[in-house]
Amino acid sequence: MTPHGYEPSLRAGERRESHSPVATRQVTRFRLFSAQDVFGLRRSAQQAAVALALDRQDQVRLATALSELGRDRVGCHDLEVAFGLDAADRPTALVVTFSWSGGPPPAADTLDLVAKLVQVDHEDGTAVSRVVITQPLPADGGRAHERHARLTEALHDGTRTTEADYLRAQTRDLIATLEETRAQREELRRLNEELEETNRGVLALYSELTQELETTNSGVLALHSELEEKRLQLQQASESKTRFWTNISHELRTPVNSVVALSRLLLAPSSPALTREQREQVDLIASSGHALLALVNDLLDVAKAEAGHLEIHPQPVDLRLLVTHQSRLLLSSHGREGVSLLTPELERQPALVTDETLLVRILRNVLSNALKFTERGEVRLDITADPEPTAPSVLFTVTDTGVGIPPDELDRVFEAFYQVRGPHQSKRPGTGLGLPYARTLTELLGGSLTLTSQVGSGTQVRIRLPDLGHVYTKEPDAGRTSRDR
């Protein structure tokens, strides 16, 4: 008998077990005859676990699993227990093999208990039955020969194990397990307290954020209500302004028409002869009346356009005739020495279907504005087909060499009644409706009006008008125009 109380059946040495689920390098094997041998097996398991640097919990698990399985198998014929390491260069597992040649199979509850503690494989054979227990090892335990030497030394310790030693070892394991459990319970209690404190903080933050969000929502609702009220007020003001412009334009048109008609009568050949001074004064009255009538008509059209009541009457436009007529009128009313009005020849004029009356007003306002603020140089009108393939369109470009517009006022010139202030303004009175009116009519025709300018170098206005020939069709019965539906 060995000092452990159980007898080795083979001397310590290297051996590869072909029947084991894991190829092993065997260290030693022992025979088990009695309960006293089981006590030694438990001690050997603890010493092996310590030598292989397993932690405290794995030591207890391995010793308990081997002792329980040994107690279950004691009495079986040729019962042996073999300790070994897997055959890798750096072993990763301790392999303990129970083998016997006769006796009942292991109890199911014993195998269940062992399986909860370690990895276990059971093989019932006709000649030899086996149970193989595999315990993973720490990764930093050294190479194979180092672990093999430590395991050999631990398993050949000469200390004899008695039942009292076994009970004391179990008591120590139980106390250690209880201490570890208590420490884990304390750690769990501490973590629960921290979690509860964190939850209280989260709830407080959530409550605060909820309150702030409700306050913000109340403010947003109040602001939305105020904005809606302001919007209605602005809409009412805009409608009132439109009604005012419409009414005042109608009221002004009648006396202005009377002034123009009476001045024409005074200048007619059938009227009594006037002196030179009287004719000049009547001419001045007629010119002022025409200017005032044009302004009233513009105001009325702006009011109609904003209200959506300005009707569009598209028809094919002869651009050559339109340009010739406009150039003559503008030169007679705005012509000045040192300024040339250049218009295109239009040998191949682009096709355009639009409202000719509104187009005339757009070009008249843009060209008049360019001539008004150009002291020397030229005002050029170019007409080309829009190269963009999206839809048939015509580009009207008016370029002048006038005073230009400061960059910070480029957007404001499209505000109604706004005029760029400066010394050039004193000799060129106006209402500030020209460009806003032109842009309004352009957008009404489905086009766009853009402006670029540089102070001292001049201004360029680009008007893009779509060809409405594919949008409108003739009504055969009334001869009027209507949109395709």
Image (spheres, rainbow, N blue to C red):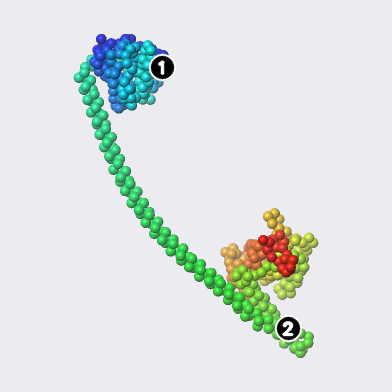
Is disc 1 surrounded by few (<14), some (14 to 19) or many (20+) residues within 10 Å?
some
Q: Residue drawn at (69%, 78%), measured in percent from left and top? A: 290
Q: Residue drawn at (73%, 86%), measured in percent from left and top? A: 266
The amino acid marked with disc number 1 is Ala
The residue to which callout 1 is attached is 23
Q: Residue furthest bottom?
A: 272
**Res 388 → quadrant:** bottom right
Helix, strand or loop at label 1? It is: loop
Point out the image quarter for the C terminus.
bottom right
Residue 188 makes an appearance in the image: yes
On the image, the x and y values in percent for residue 76 come to 30, 13
On the image, the x and y values in percent for residue 144 come to 38, 18
| Lateral position of residue 484 relative to residue 104, left or right | right
Point out the image quarter for the N terminus.
top left
The residue to which callout 2 is attached is 264
The amino acid marked with disc number 2 is Arg
On the image, the x and y values in percent for residue 81 come to 32, 15
| Lateral position of residue 389 relative to residue 168, left or right | right
